């Protein structure tokens, strides 16, 4: 009887070991499913998520399942990137990214420029900034990021000269040359469009321009170009710049198809930066 029981136990061990050895083979699963890799990206709704939607099918053919998570704020997409809940994000320009990274002790990297939401100069009285009369009033946004951005734009137009036109946080006090003695005043960005008829010229953010039926491409007299340092970028954590999934995303976004989509869909309120 003892020998009989030992024999049964031995067989049980053998079969048990055999089952464990078969498990890895069963885990290989569907080979097609393994080829597709998920890429989770955070984005704000317009235009970022809308642009990303245009490349989902193309990326699927390349083996990348693009999952777009929508955010209505500018903090969570970077925080979740730091926590590795997101693989990348698309909502910010480099100056904001660098400031956020420094304040939050993160290593963020801009992988590629995709679009610019252009800041532009508008006027009801002149067709060219060179026509502004001496002493004319010029309005610019008063928040630190857009104030510096507006002054750099005016410097680029040639009507003023800054002490340093690479200084993104320039203030009115940083104007070194003002040949026409223009009266440059900083005001809340949302208030500027309603004051346009009262001044010689005004620098207006793209979103507020569109709200007031102003098209940056057709209604402005001077506009940022694709070389703006405020181009919106694909951002990743340092070390992930060469991730194959990210590189496939960049290639899909920086294509003629997406360039045409941006130009036709947004009619100048958003312009390609590639």
Image: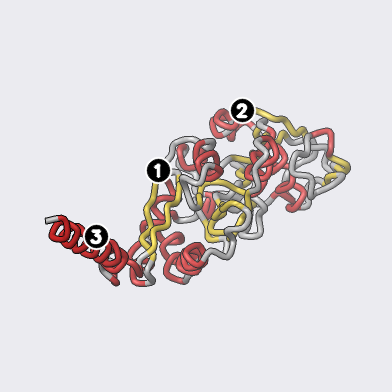
Quarter of the rendering occupied by the C terminus: bottom right
**Placement of 263 over or under 155, stated as above or below:** below
Disc 2 element = loop
Q: 2 and 80: which one is in front? A: 2
Q: Residue 235 appears at what percent x and percent y? A: 56, 52
Q: Residue 132 appears at what percent x and percent y? A: 73, 44
Q: Residue at x 63, y 45 (%)?
A: 97
Position of residue 29 in the picture relative to residue 129 (left or right): left
Q: Nearer the viewer, mark 2 or mark 3?
A: 3
Q: Residue 34 appears at what percent x and percent y? A: 34, 67
**Residue 50 appears in the rendering:** yes
**Placement of 86 over or under 30, stated as above or below:** above
Q: 46 and 28: which one is in front? A: 28
The label shown at residue 70 is: 1
Check the image and tell me how it is coloured: secondary structure
Q: 164 and 39: which one is in front? A: 39
The label shown at residue 188 is: 2
Position of residue 168 in the picture relative to residue 209 (left or right): right
Among numbered discs 3 and 1, the one appearing first in the sequence: 3
The label shown at residue 13 is: 3
- Mark 3 and mark 1: span between their CA atoms? 53 Å
Position of residue 262 in the picture relative to residue 177 (left or right): left
**Residue 259 appears in the rendering:** no
Q: Residue at x 65, y 36 (%)?
A: 104
């Amino acid at each position: 009887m003892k020998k009989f029981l030992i024999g049964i136990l031995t067989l049980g061990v053998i079969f048990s070991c055999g089952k464990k050895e078969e498990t890895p083979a069963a885990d290989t699963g569907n080979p097609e499913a393994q080829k597709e890799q998920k890429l989770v990206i955070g984005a704000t709704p317009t235009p970022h998520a809308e642009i990303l939607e245009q490349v989902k099918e193309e990326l699927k053919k390349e083996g990348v399942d693009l999952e777009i998570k929508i955010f209505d704020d500018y903090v969570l997409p970077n925080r979740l990137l730091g926590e590795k809940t997101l693989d990348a994000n698309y909502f910010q320009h480099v100056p904001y990214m660098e400031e956020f990274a420094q304040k939050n002790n993160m290593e963020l990297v801009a992988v590629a420029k995709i679009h610019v939401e252009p800041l532009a100069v508008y006027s009801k009285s002149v067709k060219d900034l060179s026509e502004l009369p001496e002493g004319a009033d010029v309005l610019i946004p008063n928040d630190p990021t857009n104030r510096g951005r507006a002054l750099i734009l005016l410097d680029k137009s040639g009507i003023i000269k800054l002490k340093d036109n690479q200084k993104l946080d320039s203030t009115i006090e940083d104007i070194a040359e003002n040949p026409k003695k223009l009266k440059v005043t900083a005001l809340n960005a949302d208030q500027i469009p309603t004051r346009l008829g009262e001044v010689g010229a005004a620098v207006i953010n793209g979103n507020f321009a569109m709200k007031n039926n102003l098209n940056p491409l057709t209604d402005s007299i001077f506009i940022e170009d694709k070389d703006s340092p405020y181009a919106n970028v694909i951002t990743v954590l340092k070390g992930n710049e060469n991730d194959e999934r990210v590189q496939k995303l960049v290639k899909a976004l920086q294509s003629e198809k997406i360039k045409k989509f941006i130009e036709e869909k947004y009619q100048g309120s958003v312009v390609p930066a590639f």
